[in-house]
Each structure stands twice: as structure tokens, then as C-alpha cells.
Image (cartoon, grey):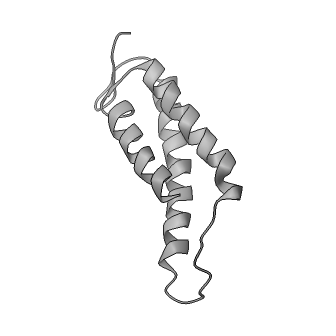
């Protein structure tokens, strides 16, 4: 999941920044939802019960996917530009 986490960061930075385009938001949403569907196949490789940073990072990744989906869906729902949300013309 580390590769996906890096890719998610790039996608969010490039497609879900301040200037947003609907087709880019849709592409980002598809990636996030695909990752969410594949989460049950992923998991932490480290099974230790103490100081398990791998598990912590996996759970953080899962949470980032949930928040990312909410941000993207909110951006898609808002068609006008307001504050730090600027919808660019296609």
C-alpha cells in the first residue's frame, strides 16, 4: 500500500488542489474508490503487537482514503467557485 499512498498524494496534489476541474476530480474519485475496494486485499505485513508502525500507517492510509473521497465528492457537488475552491472551466 505504500506505492498507492504515494500515488494518492500525487493525485490529490495535482487534481484536487485549489484549482479544480470536473474531469480531474472524477479521475481522482475513481482512483480513491478503486483503492477502497482493494483495501481488504491489502494489510499490514508486520504482525507484532507493540510499536507496529506498519499497521498504524495502513490505518492512516485507510482514513486518508475516506477523507479524500469526502473532499472530492464535496468539490464535485459545488459547481461555483468559493474561497479556496476554484472550479476551472473545462
Residue 32 appears at what percent x and percent y? 55, 41
Residue 60 appears at what percent x and percent y? 50, 63
Indicate whether 57 appears above or below 77. below
Residue 33 appears at what percent x and percent y? 61, 40
Q: Residue at x 41, y 51 (%)?
A: 6
Q: Residue at x 56, y 49 (%)?
A: 66
Picture quadrant where residue 88 is located? top left
Q: Residue at x 29, y 32 (%)?
A: 84
Furthest residue in direction right, as rendered = 40
Picture quadrant where residue 48 is located? bottom right
Furthest residue in direction bottom, as rendered = 50
- Left or right position of 21 against 47: left
- Left or right position of 48 against 15: right
- Left or right position of 18 against 90: left
Question: What is the total number of numbered labels drawn onto the structure image?
Answer: 0
Indicate whether 62 appears above or below 80. below
Indicate whether 27 appears above or below 38. above
Q: Residue at x 40, y 38 (%)?
A: 11
Picture quadrant where residue 40 is located? bottom right
Instruction: Give the quarter of the figure containing the C terminus.
Output: top left
Q: Nearer the viewer, residue 1 or 15?
A: 1
Q: Nearer the viewer, residue 45 or 15?
A: 45
Amino acid at each position: 500500500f505504500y506505492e498507492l499512498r504515494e500515488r494518492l498524494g500525487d493525485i490529490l496534489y495535482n487534481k484536487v488542489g485549489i484549482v479544480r476541474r470536473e474531469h480531474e476530480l472524477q479521475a481522482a474519485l475513481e482512483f480513491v474508490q478503486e483503492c477502497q475496494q482493494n483495501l481488504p486485499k491489502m494489510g499490514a505485513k508486520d504482525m507484532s503487537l507493540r510499536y507496529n508502525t506498519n499497521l498504524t500507517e495502513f490505518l492512516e492510509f485507510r482514513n486518508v482514503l475516506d477523507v479524500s473521497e469526502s473532499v472530492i465528492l464535496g468539490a464535485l457537488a459545488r459547481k461555483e467557485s468559493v474561497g479556496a475552491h476554484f472550479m476551472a472551466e473545462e
